[in-house]
Amino acid sequence: QVLLVESGGGLVQAGGSLRLSCATSGISFSVNVMGWYRQAPGKQRELVAAVTPDGTTNYADSKTGRFTISRDNAKNTVYLQMNSLKPEDTAVYYCNAHNPRYGIMYWGQGTQVTVSA
């Protein structure tokens, strides 16, 4: 059974920080591209950041410098450190695992992040 379980969301004031975690099981974590996406009410789901198996990172332009994605292959876990949060960062944040060799993709259930002004 494949599980991606996000945690670390919550309510924070603007300018604050949160660290999201996504613990996985049932996948070959070390060969997956791991990503964080988010979806705000009434908007499409969008990529926040991704990290390849070798640690190369990719960020949506507006997140560069404020967000940091990292992975721990020993713990099968991916993280998203979010600093200087803004109200427009409010969304449900989803963890994603993508195996590029087989084209298989899995999603977590999401964790709510709310940033108050």
Image (tube, rainbow, N blue to C red):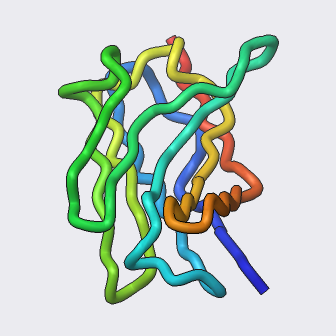
Horizontally, is 82 left or right of 46 in the view?
Answer: left
Q: Position of residue 20 (x, y in %)?
A: 47, 54
Q: Residue at x 51, y 66 (%)?
A: 101
| Foreground residue among 17 and 28 | 28
Quarter of the picture containing the N terminus is bottom right
Q: Residue at x 53, y 56 (%)?
A: 8
| Foreground residue among 83 and 43 | 43
Question: Height in image: 59 above or below 42?
Answer: below
Q: Position of residue 87 (x, y in %)?
A: 52, 14
Q: How many marks?
A: 0
| Foreground residue among 82 and 15 | 82
Question: Height in image: 107 above or below 31?
Answer: above
Question: Height in image: 96 above or below 21?
Answer: above
Q: Position of residue 79 (x, y in %)?
A: 39, 59
Q: Position of residue 42 (x, y in %)?
A: 81, 12
| Foreground residue among 113 and 71 | 71
Horizontally, is 55 left or right of 97 in the view?
Answer: left
Q: Residue at x 60, y 67 (%)?
A: 102
Q: Residue at x 18, y 27 (%)?
A: 65
Question: Height in image: 6 above or below 62?
Answer: below
Horizontally, is 2 left or right of 99 in the view?
Answer: right
